């Protein structure tokens, strides 16, 4: 080992020559630039090595949320339940608008819960780096852990909401059938999509500090365009073909409709946009892979104030 | 004499912090808007702090180096940059392996029990799940949290500040590192715990290749370091044997 070093030093720095520059010295002894970005493959491996940190960080954050409340973890179920109650009060009782949708309550609550998953992933993603600068500046780990952990947190919340949702759907007269199994692939695809979106938002949010203030408005607009409270296929029945195609490509609407299709009998495949599974898969792959690579490209720059 | 093997090379390093919301003038919406309209390009609401200005040095295997300097002289910033946690404005830091800062404060959550924080902190420092489980008892025993009852199963927010500091140190010190960086305030707590933690730091130093120690306590630097680097206003003022550097630093501070 030391022999190697001696011979190579003799080759690069003959006696009498000026001292090697820091870069040469570093190269000679195999030192690497601190905090440099690893290759994409190495990055994925590092991230996989940190999977236990990611999941336990997410679980810890979720349970830390409610420790000060007397009802504790019960709020994980109570929050979506109250949310559903509010929407039922306003849209079901006060406005009485079913807008030509059978079983409007199940339709609405499914839409709200599924959209909330994407919405809160985006908001959590925006703050994933900028809100955790202390952590980023104190410890070494692939930074993608943070937005991914945030998405897992939101997924855990959604799973609690799903329990509530199942009860509500049953109470409105739906019977569980084999189509309920479609919930699993639909959720899986949406989670990948949301994780990718959270990664993109995390990189944007780490630089653009005004994004956290701006996003709620964009997200609300997106919600109204995604058919959370109305059926897109009814409203857009006479719209031009281009508009229909655009509405059918909206990822939020696609994931919402897939969930409705899985749970609600009266929501038939005719109400689904064409090629819905292909679109759902396409969005998951494009956003998941694209978001991950784009996030990784700035890996070494996160943590600068 | 055998050639010394460098473990950390710092080459003309500059670190600049950007601070948002530190703009001059009053923080009303109208002011913010007019600032935005008046001057395009440079955002006057962002102030820059040049914390490290062109520092260069090389650390070798087996050295332990004390960093001294007054408050705000850039010591902690320099350590973070060496650890690769703060991106450099210009200049480079080359290291062997992954240097680690001794500290896990940021990963811990006050609302969770000590138990879960041990797990979380260990994972955050890069230990595997099995490693943390293996060292769990050792960490809890070292912290002495359970000496006065079963506190480890209570949320950390119920701990006294001394107890929390002890648990944090115990988690951070559970693992050995190649290049280890220790920030002063770590060894806190009562006398008994300070003795124990100093012994643990000595142990870690033996296992590590190179150690950096930031401290305002000149005695502990003299005791543990054979080389010292004196930073003032982000520039390297002196680099040499501990005794000489501390003597010069003492003269400087007393002259003030």
Image: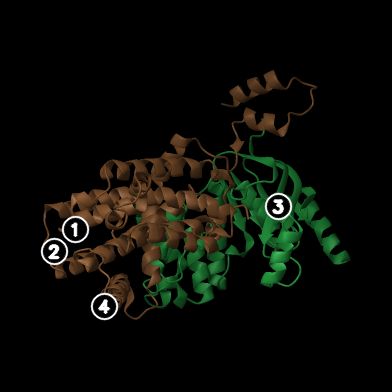
Chain colours: A brown, B green
Q: For label 2, count other residues whose C-alpha is less than 10 Å away and answer few (under 14), some (14-19) or many (20+).
A: some
Dot 1 or dot 2: first in sequence order is 2
Let me know if marks 3 and 4 both belong to one chain: no
Dot 4 or dot 2: first in sequence order is 4
Instruction: Quadrant for residue A89, please give it.
Output: bottom left
Judging from the image, mark 4 belongs to the subunit labelled A
Instruction: Quadrant for residue B112, please give it.
Output: bottom left
Q: For label 3, count other residues whose C-alpha is less than 10 Å away and answer few (under 14), some (14-19) or many (20+).
A: some
Let me know if marks 3 and 1 both belong to one chain: no
Where is residue A210? Give x, y as percent: 58, 60
Q: Badges 3 and 4: C-beta atoms under 8 Å apart?
A: no
Residue at which label 1 appears:
A263
Q: CA distance from mark 1 to mark 2?
A: 8 Å
Helix or strand or loop: what does disc 4 sit on? helix
Above or below for B192 versus A255? below
Residue at which label 3 appears:
B16
Q: For label 4, count other residues whose C-alpha is less than 10 Å away and answer few (under 14), some (14-19) or many (20+).
A: few
Residue drawn at the location 28% of the way across and 40% of the way down = A278
Residue at which label 2 appears:
A174
Judging from the image, mark 1 belongs to the subunit labelled A
Quarter containing the N terminus of chain A = top right
Q: CA distance from mark 3 to mark 1?
A: 54 Å
Q: In front of the other: label 4 or label 1?
A: 4
Q: CA distance from mark 3 to mark 4?
A: 58 Å
* Left or right of B38, for residue A45: left
Judging from the image, mark 3 belongs to the subunit labelled B
Helix or strand or loop: what does disc 1 sit on? helix
Q: CA distance from mark 4 to mark 2?
A: 20 Å
């Amino acid at each position: 080992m030391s022999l190697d070093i001696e011979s190579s030093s003799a080759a690069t720095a003959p006696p009498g020559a000026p001292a090697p520059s820091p870069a040469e010295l570093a190269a000679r002894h195999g030192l690497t630039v601190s905090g440099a970005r690893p290759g994409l493959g190495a990055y994925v491996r590092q991230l996989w090595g940190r999977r236990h940190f990611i999941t336990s960080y997410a679980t810890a954050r979720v349970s830390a949320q409610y420790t000060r409340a007397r009802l504790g973890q019960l709020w994980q179920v109570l929050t979506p339940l109250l949310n559903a109650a509010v929407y039922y009060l306003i849209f079901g009782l006060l406005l009485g608008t079913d807008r030509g949708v059978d079983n409007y309550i199940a339709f609405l609550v499914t839409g709200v819960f599924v959209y909330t998953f994407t919405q809160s992933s985006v908001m959590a993603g925006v703050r994933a780096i900028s809100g955790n600068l202390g952590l980023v500046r104190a410890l070494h780990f692939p930074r993608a852990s943070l937005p991914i952990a945030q998405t897992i947190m939101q997924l855990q919340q959604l799973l609690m909401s799903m329990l509530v949702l199942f009860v509500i759907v049953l109470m409105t007269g739906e019977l569980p059938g084999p189509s309920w199994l479609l919930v699993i692939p639909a959720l899986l695809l949406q989670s990948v999509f949301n994780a990718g979106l959270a990664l993109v938002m995390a990189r944007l949010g780490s630089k653009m500090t005004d994004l956290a203030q701006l996003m709620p408005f964009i997200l609300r607009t997106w919600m109204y365009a995604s058919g959370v409270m109305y059926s897109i296929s009814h409203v857009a029945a006479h719209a031009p073909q281009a508009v229909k195609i655009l509405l059918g490509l909206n990822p939020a609407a696609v994931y919402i409709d897939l969930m409705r299709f899985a749970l609600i009998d009266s929501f038939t495949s005719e109400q689904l946009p064409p090629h819905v599974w292909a679109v759902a898969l396409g969005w998951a792959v494009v956003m998941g892979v694209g978001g991950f690579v784009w996030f990784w490209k700035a890996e070494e720059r996160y943590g600068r104030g | 004499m055998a050639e010394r093997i460098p473990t950390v090379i710092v080459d003309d390093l500059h670190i600049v912090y950007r601070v948002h919301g530190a703009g001059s003038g009053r923080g009303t919406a109208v002011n913010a808007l007019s600032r935005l309209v008046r001057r395009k390009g440079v955002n006057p609401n962002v102030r820059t702090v040049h914390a490290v200005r062109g520092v260069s040095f090389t650390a070798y295997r087996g050295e332990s180096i004390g960093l001294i300097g007054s408050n705000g002289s850039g010591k902690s910033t320099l350590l973070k940059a060496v650890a690769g946690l703060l991106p450099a404005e210009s200049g480079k830091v080359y290291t062997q392996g992954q240097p680690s800062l001794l500290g896990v404060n940021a990963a811990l959550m006050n609302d969770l029990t000590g138990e879960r924080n041990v797990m979380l902190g260990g994972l955050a420092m890069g230990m595997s799940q099995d490693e943390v489980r293996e060292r769990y008892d050792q960490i809890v025993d070292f912290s002495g949290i359970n000496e006065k009852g079963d506190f480890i199963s209570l949320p950390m927010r119920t701990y006294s500040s001394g107890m929390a500091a002890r648990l944090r140190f115990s988690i951070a010190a559970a693992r050995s590192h190649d290049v280890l960086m220790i920030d002063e305030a770590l060894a806190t707590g009562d006398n008994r715990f300070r003795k124990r933690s100093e012994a643990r730091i000595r142990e870690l130093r033996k296992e590590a290749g190179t150690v950096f120690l930031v401290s305002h306590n000149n005695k502990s630097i003299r005791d543990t370091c054979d080389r010292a680097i004196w930073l003032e206003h982000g520039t390297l003022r002196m680099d040499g044997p501990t005794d000489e550097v501390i003597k010069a630093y003492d003269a400087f501070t007393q002259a003030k």
